[in-house]
Image: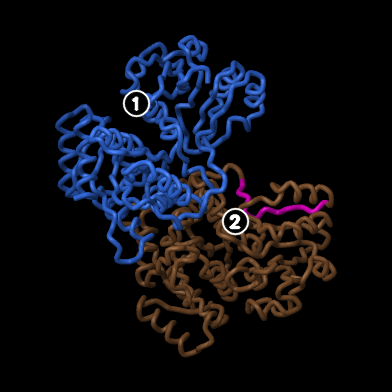
Chain colours: A blue, B brown
């Protein structure tokens, strides 16, 4: 690195919008390093917050060159597709960056240096590639290791994929820090890893080792923190991703779960058959049942102790209040939107977690 | 190949026993090609059936040379470990085989040619390596494809890992063939692939694509058969492998399931904490619940329609009868051991499947 902390430009060409730029938004909201620009020529010049409601002050620019002029020394790919391929439109910009010695961080399944032209650009210019989803070697099979018992594990789970599980986890981390707790964020996906600087993308490991990867992260984090907030992945009801979700659930073996939902989501994300999202109360039952399978029969059950609802799609305060109230009545649980409600919302979830596990 | 059909020697050095040589036993019982020898110097000379109850007539020999003298032109690694590493004791034999132009078939996670000495032996002698667990490129995310509707899918599921799900699937295939049906075996693990000659090891794909791999296999097989019998993997109650199991369940989207159990198994295989196996009736409920999550609420539920119990560990006929009867009473389902009971047992399971799906 040229700077002690990276100075990051986010590549989101043509896709810098709430539905398509999940990694960009996560980094803009939570990264501990400066984001000097977002690259999307179709939205430049403008301010990041105008498009995604996060990153006020970060300029949207049209070219890599403009971001370099602002001091960028890392280019983070800020969008993701379900298949994990590098968009063809990104390849020239990535080549340009690597050829100029700019590092590239990628969370896609496809490896940047597997493209011969990008590998050649990197060799020429000295730009390095950090593959956020590259799993460590020698992962274990899960189920054979116990963490330090005093450490409590909280997993965010979802009514669907991409409903805000990482955001909720990071907000709980912040709330517990405000309360003076020793807390660790356990990153399990590419955006979380880009923010935290470490972690394992459990959707990218060889399938036999999903739980083992989660278990290793949790056991290691338990040595340095009393609260481990694990970023959830996918959904048990998502026909494409449910295996990753259950492996993570059984590998992290949470003491409590927080159910995350997006009030706008009516159908399972990315599913061509329009599969409907299940009711919150049904999701609570499903996650609690599934969590119990990996324990001896009769063990205390890990509970869903709070619900976090992403209400960002609505500007109608009455509708938002009614949504949160309805969820409270339906589930009998505390319900918050930790982004819309700010610290009080996140504190509410953190209090529910502490009350359930310490009370 | 030197012969129109491979002539296979199975490497099981020091491990040719029921608990450790699952791949060897599967191939000895079901492979459509000749097994000319099993290599295990600690058990040679003897007959395979004396050790594993299968493969009568196949000699156990002490060296690779003896198996070559019997005409072997393929060396199949016949054992597996949970971590999937090549045992160090196997490396000299594998090197010797590859250096003499003998092909090696491996179902381990570790790739044979990743060992420089084995790669060098292969380059020198012309022996080729077939990695049974190597996934195809460009797998899709699951959930977005429907199979030909008239084709019925049956998935074998288990009370634990390694209880006989592949065996039961192959016995159902044979029974439906006897009944004149157009049936396909869908191999999802290394032994099944070694037997069938095709398939995808769903535990070896990148985790995001477990369901997509299963779905692709099922959709393709549905074009050439009316009954698709899918080899199950792991168990929803196994803390290490449950993610693979759920991904396969949601990707294959069975119309019916057959629950497999080993009467001797008291604790989850390979788990150091002695996690107990759950009751059959509880497993039935768990699999039926989990199968339903990937469908719209209110859809018809895929049912467990029969139970297959591996009773090979007992020579006590009364105990075996009591075990099968007890399972019938507990679950209210037809219960058979398709190996001990031979064709009548397998026919009983096949009849239960046909009755449930056509009746």
Quarter occupied by residue A266: top left
Q: What secondary structure is found at the residue carrying circle 1?
A: helix
The correct choice, above or below, for B38 with respect to A182 in the image is below
Q: In this view, does B339 lie to the left or right of A352?
A: right
Task: Tell if the residue under mark 1 belongs to the same chain as the one under mark 2.
Answer: no
The quadrant the N terminus of chain B occupies is: bottom right
Q: Can residue B347 be seen in this view?
A: no
* Residue B12 position in % (x across, y down): 68, 67
* Residue B229 position in % (x across, y down): 53, 64
Q: Reply yes or no: does residue B134 show up in magenta.
A: yes
The correct choice, above or below, for A359 with respect to A229 in the image is below
Query: Can you identify the residue that label 1 sits on?
Result: A29
* Residue A112 position in % (x across, y down): 58, 30
The reply to whether discs 1 and 2 touch (Cβ–Cβ < 8 Å) is: no
Q: Residue most toward the bottom?
A: B318
Q: Residues within 10 Å of mark 2 (few under 14, many from 20)?
A: some
The correct choice, above or below, for A182 with respect to A333 in the image is above
Q: Chain letter of disc 1?
A: A
Q: Main secondary structure of the magenta part?
A: loop
Q: Chain letter of disc 2?
A: B
Tell me where the magenta segment starts and ends, as one range: B126-136
The quadrant the C terminus of chain B occupies is: bottom left
Q: In this view, does A213 lie to the left or right of B119?
A: left
User: Observer-nearest residue: B48 or B29?
Assistant: B48
* Residue A85 position in % (x across, y down): 54, 34
User: Observer-nearest residue: B213 or B225?
Assistant: B213
Quarter occupied by residue A158: top left
Q: What secondary structure is found at the residue carrying circle 2?
A: loop
Q: Residue at x 39, y 14 (%)?
A: A59
Real-space CA distance between mark 1 and mark 2, rounded to the nearest whole angstrom: 40 Å
């Amino acid at each position: 690195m040229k700077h002690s902390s990276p100075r990051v430009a986010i590549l989101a060409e043509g896709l810098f919008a709430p539905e398509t730029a999940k990694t960009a938004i996560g980094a803009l909201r939570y990264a501990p390093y400066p984001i000097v620009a977002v690259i999307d020529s179709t939205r430049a010049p403008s301010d990041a917050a105008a498009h995604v409601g996060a990153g006020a002050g970060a300029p949207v620019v049209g070219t890599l060159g403009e971001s370099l002029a602002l001091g960028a020394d890392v280019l983070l790919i800020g969008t993701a597709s379900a298949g994990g391929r590098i968009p063809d439109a990104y390849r020239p910009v990535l080549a340009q960056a690597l050829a100029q010695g700019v590092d590239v961080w990628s969370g896609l399944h496809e490896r940047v240096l597997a493209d011969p032209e990008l590998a050649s650009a990197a060799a020429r210019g000295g730009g390095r590639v950090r593959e956020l989803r590259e799993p460590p070697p020698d992962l274990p099979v899960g189920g054979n290791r116990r963490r330090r018992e005093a450490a409590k594990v909280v997993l965010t789970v979802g009514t669907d994929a991409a409903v805000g599980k990482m955001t909720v986890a990071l907000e709980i981390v912040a709330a517990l820090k405000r309360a003076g707790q020793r807390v660790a964020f356990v990153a399990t996906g590419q955006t979380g890893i880009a923010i935290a600087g470490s972690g394992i993308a459990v959707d990218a490991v060889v399938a036999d080792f999903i739980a083992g990867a989660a278990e290793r992260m949790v056991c290691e984090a338990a040595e340095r923190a009393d609260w481990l907030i694990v970023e959830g992945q996918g959904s048990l009801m998502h026909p494409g991703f449910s295996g990753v979700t259950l492996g993570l659930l059984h590998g992290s073996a949470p003491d409590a779960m927080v159910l995350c939902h997006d009030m706008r989501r009516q159908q399972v994300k990315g599913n061509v058959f329009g599969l409907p999202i299940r009711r919150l109360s049904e999701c609570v039952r499903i996650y609690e049942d599934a969590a119990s399978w990996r324990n001896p029969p009769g063990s205390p059950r890990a509970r869903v102790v709070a619900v976090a609802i992403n209400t960002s799609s609505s500007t109608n305060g009455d509708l938002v209040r009614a949504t949160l109230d309805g969820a409270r009545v339906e589930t009998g649980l505390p319900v918050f939107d930790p982004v819309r409600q700010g610290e009080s919302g996140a504190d509410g979830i953190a209090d529910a977690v502490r009350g359930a596990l310490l009370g």
